[in-house]
Image (cartoon, rainbow, N blue to C red):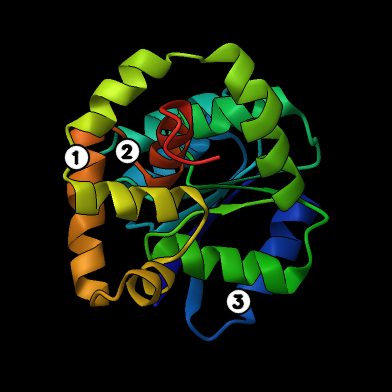
């Protein structure tokens, strides 16, 4: 069972997302927060696997909340869910440690899929936002290729193969099939990759891999 938290200052949005998530027999909404500060309080009091977090909220916005949530002893996976398809929001959310970024007009089935993917350790980005992030905003604001290359160079050749596939958005199952490995072995590689690259999730690892020129 995936324990979820909805973080949004709009009561109707919270209600709609709660109804959607509760329609999945493998997801349980255990908390609803009205802003980022409230989210941190609830995540401290409840075990939360995945939090869907709005960006623009009073008291504490979603970007700051993501940073605070990721710093908890048992941090939830985080999907930033917003009305605003702005590059800066996407990048800042991922830099803060979000595992996914979706627009609120995303199809309900895709939102449910995102929760399952993120809970399993994968990442989920709205396709348009992801492509623009990689092709334009990220490349112009964080060149850092030399530093990125030095981090990637610390990986074994096999780990670099896994990282290259991860940067293309492949799931662990996809990587296992493409590289002829067991899925459990892929998970072990991904865990070491995150540690070696000093990043908190697959999305940040993928961005660093692209900075290093490991993939396009």
Work out whether mark 1 precedes mark 3 in sequence or the reverse, and give the earlier one. 3
Where residue 7 sits in the image (x, y, percent)? 59, 46
Residue behind mark 1: 155
Q: Is residue 142 left or right of residue 152?
A: right
In which quarter of the view is residue 198 placed? Answer: top left
* Front residue of 186 and 164: 164
Q: Is residue 58 left or right of residue 207?
A: right
In which quarter of the view is residue 171 placed? Answer: bottom left
Q: Residue at x 43, y 14 (%)?
A: 144
* Front residue of 172 and 42: 172
Q: Would you say the residues marked 2 and 1 are in contact, meaning their CB atoms lie under 8 Å apart?
A: no
Q: Is residue 23 left or right of residue 161?
A: right
Where residue 153 sits in the image (x, y, percent)? 22, 31
Q: Secondary structure at mark 1?
A: loop
Q: Residue at x 63, y 14 (%)?
A: 140
Work out whether mark 2 precedes mark 1 in sequence or the reverse, and give the earlier one. 1
- Whole-angstrom CA distance, mark 2 to mark 1, is 16 Å
* Front residue of 175 and 194: 175
Residue behind mark 2: 200
Q: Which mark is residue 124?
A: none
Give the crowd class for mark 2: few <14, some 14-19, many >=20 residues within 10 Å: some
Query: For the C terminus, which image quadrant?
Result: top right
Residue behind mark 3: 22
């Amino acid at each position: 069972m995936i324990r979820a938290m909805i973080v949004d200052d709009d009561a109707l949005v919270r209600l709609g997302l709660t109804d959607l998530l509760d329609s999945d027999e493998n997801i349980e909404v255990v908390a609803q927060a009205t802003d980022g500060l409230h989210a941190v309080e609830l995540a401290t009091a409840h075990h939360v696997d995945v939090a869907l977090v709005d960006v623009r909220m009073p008291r504490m916005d979603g970007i700051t909340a993501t940073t605070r949530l990721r710093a908890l002893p048992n941090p939830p996976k985080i999907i930033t869910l917003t009305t605003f398809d702005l590059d800066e929001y996407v990048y800042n959310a991922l830099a803060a440690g979000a595992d996914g970024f979706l627009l609120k007009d995303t199809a309900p089935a895709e939102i449910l899929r995102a929760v399952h993917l993120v809970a399993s350790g994968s990442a989920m980005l709205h396709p348009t936002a992801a492509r623009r992030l990689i092709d334009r905003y990220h490349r112009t604001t964080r060149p850092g290729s030399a530093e990125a290359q030095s981090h990637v160079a610390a990986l074994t050749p096999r780990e670099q193969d896994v990282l290259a596939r991860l940067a293309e958005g492949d799931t662990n199952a996809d990587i296992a099939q493409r590289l002829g490995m067991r899925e459990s072995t892929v998970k072990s590689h991904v865990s070491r990759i995150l540690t070696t690259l000093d990043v908190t999730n697959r999305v940040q690892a993928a961005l660093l891999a692209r900075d290093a020129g490991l993939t396009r």
